Amino acid sequence: MGERKDAICDARALGVPKMLILGLQHMFAMFGATILVPMLVNGYYGVDSAMSIQVTLVCAGLGTLFFHLCSKFQVPAFLGSSFAFLGGYATVAQLDAGIFADMPMEEKAQYACGGIVVAGLFYLVLALIIKLVGVKKVMRFLPPVVTGPIIICIGLSLAPSAINNASTNWILALIALATIIIFNVWGKGMFKIIPILLGVVISYAAALIMNAAGLTNPDGTAILDFTRVIADPVIGLQPFRLCRFDVSAILVMAPIALATMMEHIGDISAISATIGKNFIEEPGLHRTLMGDGLATSISALFGGPANTTYGENTGVLELSRVHDPRVIRIAALFAIVLSFFPKFAAIIASMPAAIIGGVSFMLYGMISAIGIRNVIENHVDFTKSRNLIIAAVILVCGLGFSNGLTFTVAGTSITLTGLAIAAIAGILLNAVLPGKDYHFGEDPKADANRGLDMNPIQ
């Protein structure tokens, strides 16, 4: 494979002003989704201090720079907040046994971050295994009949949260959802690749107009509350909060790494295909996994969300035809600078829950849709009983155990989430049931869709 002929490989030829504009474009592409994660987490915990937007932005910027260091400054990827762990955050918020009984919500969020630190370390384990035995041998144990339904469960398990938030003001929620759909389908240029940000901005403008007109939410509460915006300073340091560790929280969060590692492999393959370089082979999947995992663990260590490579920024690469990783690093610096302005963070935090719900309609559904696509593109044959059994058990476990499964070991209360139970059940069933119809290497096109053919589709 070779670099696209019409692409700009060295953005320095464009000059500093244009490089800054291109970096700003990448920052806006990731911005809407990245800051939405702490807003959703704060909603789960019922407090604005569970996760800081300032901390989220600085962790995204620093995580991206750290990823570039680990990947030898070759891969033009931006690391933003991962949505895959939201179900885990919601579950930890609901824990009320053992040490979690009567625990302040801010502390529960710290324990959730501790679980993500461990999840990030799982990336390092997989990176080491891939380095030692090769990527192809490892992926044989994670066929699409297992990973696809697990990803579907992640999105569907979050659906009630979207409905609950949207129901606080359906007008705002529908404005946000309609805006995203319109710009995603009919948008042109820059507008097409930032539909989430546009959905937030336009619906927030509608909220300002409705609030100024004296309208309220259906329950009588004010649509907007600027108390914190007025109180917070313009400039300030990020409110870092160290994570804490507990076995229950670790078992809630850590298994989600199975899905996010699969997402990482697909993203790196997509970036390889977009750029025309095989990043899975050089600098190597083990290096990109290491960068993503360490960025996730370091972020959670200080109270930030898990990081993940962002498809939005891959779209920017395709649109702009500027493939220089330096532009991505400029975007990371923009995110870090922005994190020093708490008043801006307070403005974002004042966003009505209904807007978050409207945006979540699209995001949560897209997570499940990605899982469905994973199953379809990899030709999972559901006329085979074993595949039906594996998928059925995963879906019922992931959605049926809505409160998880709690048990006590050596006096310690341990809770497995529905997603963790689903992942364990799926992997075990795939290992013991006879008649596997997926054998790695027999269908190069299917393997390519999973980013495992070592020669991404052009």
Image (cartoon, rainbow, N blue to C red):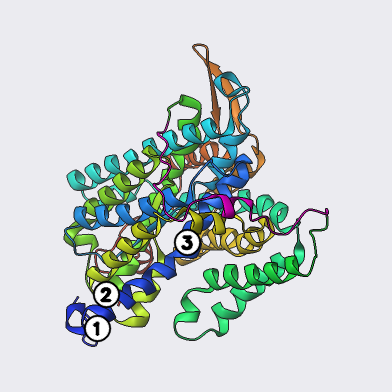
Going by the numbered disc 3, the residue's amino acid type is Asn
Note whether 40 is above or below 416 in the view shown. Answer: below
Residue pointed to by mark 3? 374
Residue pointed to by mark 2? 275
x then y, percent, for residue 264: 36, 56
Note whether 405 is above or below 46 in the view shown. Answer: above
Quick check: is 231 in the magenta stretch?
A: yes
**Marks 1 and 2: which is nearer the front?**
1
Marks 3,1: beta carbons within 8 A: no
**Marks 2 and 3: which is nearer the front?**
2
116 relative to 162 in the view: left or right: left
Residue closest to the eye, 234 or 130: 234
Residue pointed to by mark 1? 7
x then y, percent, for residue 138: 29, 47
Going by the numbered disc 2, the residue's amino acid type is Ile
x then y, percent, for residue 306: 41, 47
Secondary element at image label 2: helix
Quarter of the image with the C terminus in it:
bottom left
Is residue 410 at least partly visible in the picture? yes
Rounded to the nearest whole Å, what is the CA distance between mark 2 and mark 3?
22 Å
